[in-house]
Image (spheres, rainbow, N blue to C red):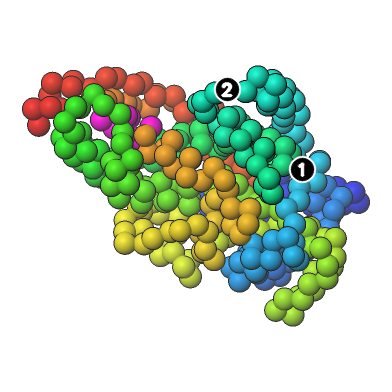
Amino acid sequence: MGLPLLGETLQFFSPNTTSDISPFIKQRMKRYGSIFKTNLVGRPVVVSTDPDLNYFIFQQEGQMFQSWYPDTFTEIFGKQNGRKRAMKMLKNMLQERREKPRKQQTDFFDYVIEELRKEGTILTEAIALDLMFVLLFASFETTSLALTYAMKLLSDHPLVLKQLQEEHEAILKRREDPNSGVTWQEYKSMTFTFQFITETVRLANIVPGIFRKALREINFKGYTIPAGWAVMVCPPAVHLNPAKYQDPLAFNPWRWEGVELNGASKHFMAFGGGMRFCVGTDFTKVQMAVFLHSLVTKYRWQPIKGGNIIRTPGLQFPNGFHVQIMEKDQRKLESE
């Protein structure tokens, strides 16, 4: 399983420019099958590209598996240093608000404090701080990457952009006040937008691996996962599976037409799954939808430079994606 201590860590993090399953995973799938073992940062890890095992892992959260990321991984992914400072800041803010409570609830802190005061609540301060961190900070990086990728896809697929514009311009025409903000009813009517967002995150595969730890020895399909071993669910292998998705590397929002997604499934887990399904999922979708609404109704753009993708194994734009944004002629839009 690779070099002493390092294992196959260097191969796992080796940069690649493919939109397909990473060479590290793909080569081992071909050699060993959909479930195989490796060693990453000094820990034995079972890698699962099997939809059934992935689903089983998420459903057994808290019973047979628990959420887990080794410290060395969080440091390599670059999140640990910022997290400590952010958590300290959030804890201080929560303490100040507790000492000087407001008469009326005006923001998320107020609702958290109210819930913490309730008798029998399952919410603890640690859980509340974790939740706030995910909503405010951890989701920022993933959402910004998804939006950058979305703009690149729109730039490369004019027919998709055309249908997205038509959907959002129709929303503007139905409004009594064209300058008012997006309503919840309008948001729920964005059918093609949701198809576009789903297809974007399917191909983006921003989170290349979801880690769990086996709480006891587990037998599944003839495989044995020892107690204490890490398990890495591999979303790209699920999202790019040709047995489920026709022409899986093609960007095709219409493949989601008529498909309802209520959380994760065996074949779609861009936002995690099980009890640890990403708490910021709906928030992220709203952010992306409102951004896209503003983008396609008010502006036009053209790529200037950058836009090349690298995966290490997470999605990155090493040179950014530079675009020139120009405001649309609103008078022309209203006359159409």
Q: Which is nearer the eye, 297 or 314?
A: 297
Outermost residue toward the bottom in this view: 222
* Lower sequence index among marks 1 and 2: 1
**Where does label 2 land, which residue?**
102
Q: Residue at x 52, y 28 (%)?
A: 105
On the image, the x and y values in percent for residue 166 come to 21, 41
Q: Residue at x 57, y 46 (%)?
A: 279
Which is closer to the viewer, label 1 or label 2? Answer: 2
Outermost residue toward the left in this view: 335
**Where does label 1 land, which residue?**
73
Predominant SS along the magenta part: helix
Is residue 106 at least partly visible in the picture? yes
Residue 125 falls in image quadrant: top right
Q: Residue at x 70, y 21 (%)?
A: 99
Q: Which residues are magenta?
A: 291-297
User: Which quadrant of the figure contains the N terminus?
Assistant: bottom right
Q: Secondary structure at mark 1?
A: helix
On the image, the x and y values in percent for residue 282 come to 47, 45
Residue 220 falls in image quadrant: bottom right
The type of residue carrying mark 2 is Arg
Q: Taking 27 as reference, is 112 above or below it?
A: above
Is residue 160 at least partly visible in the picture? no
Q: Which is nearer the eye, 33 or 113?
A: 113
In the displayed structure, does residue 326 sit left or right of residue 226? left
Q: Residues within 10 Å of mark 1 (few under 14, many from 20)?
A: some
Q: Is residue 103 magenta?
A: no
Q: Residue at x 36, y 62 (%)?
A: 259
On the image, the x and y values in percent for residue 68 come to 76, 51
